[in-house]
Image (cartoon, rainbow, N blue to C red):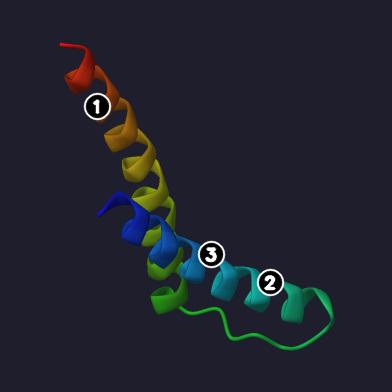
Amino acid sequence: MIEEAEQCIADAHRAQTSLLQKEAQGDDIAYSVTMMHGQDHLMTTILLKDLMKHLIQLYKRG
């Protein structure tokens, strides 16, 4: 499940990077509350994934 989650997160990160690149190239990207909310979810998900990896390692040690 972790590998599947990592792939989904990587896909979301690529989509985010694509938007950032378009904006950097001068394209007018509409930045909405929905976009900001999605960014928050992506960051939280990445943090949670890293935390869960550490918790799994700790559980395996015990």
How many angstroms separate mark 3 from mark 1 (CA)? 23 Å
Q: Residue at x 64, y 69 (%)?
A: 17
Graded by Cα atoms within 10 Å as few (under 14), some (14 to 19) or many (20 or more), the crowding at tag 2 reads: few
Is tag 3's residue or tag 1's residue first in the polypeptide sequence?
3
Q: Are marks 3 and 1 in contact (CB under 8 Å)?
A: no
Is tag 1's residue or tag 2's residue first in the polypeptide sequence?
2
Q: Are marks 1 and 2 in contact (CB under 8 Å)?
A: no
Locate the C terminus by quadrant: top left
Identify the amino acid type marked 3.
Answer: His
Residue holding disc 2: 20
Q: Residue at x 36, y 54 (%)?
A: 3
Between residues 26 and 10, which one lies in front from this camera angle?
10
Q: Residue at x 25, y 55 (%)?
A: 1
Query: Image quadrant of residue 14?
Result: bottom right
Task: Give percent across and percent down for residue 2.
Answer: 30, 50
Residue 47, relative to residue 14: is it above or below?
above
How many angstroms separate mark 1 from mark 2 (CA)? 32 Å
Task: Give percent across and percent down for residue 60.
Answer: 20, 21
Q: Residue at x 24, y 26 (%)?
A: 55
Task: Give percent across and percent down for residue 30.
Answer: 59, 86
Q: Nearer the viewer, mark 1 or mark 2?
A: 1
Identify the amino acid type marked 2.
Answer: Leu
Between residues 2 and 46, which one lies in front from this camera angle?
2
Task: Give percent across and percent down for residue 38.
Answer: 40, 69
> Is residue 54 rendered to the left or right of residue 26?
left
Graded by Cα atoms within 10 Å as few (under 14), some (14 to 19) or many (20 or more), the crowding at tag 3 reads: some
Q: Which mark is residue 55?
A: 1
Residue holding disc 3: 13
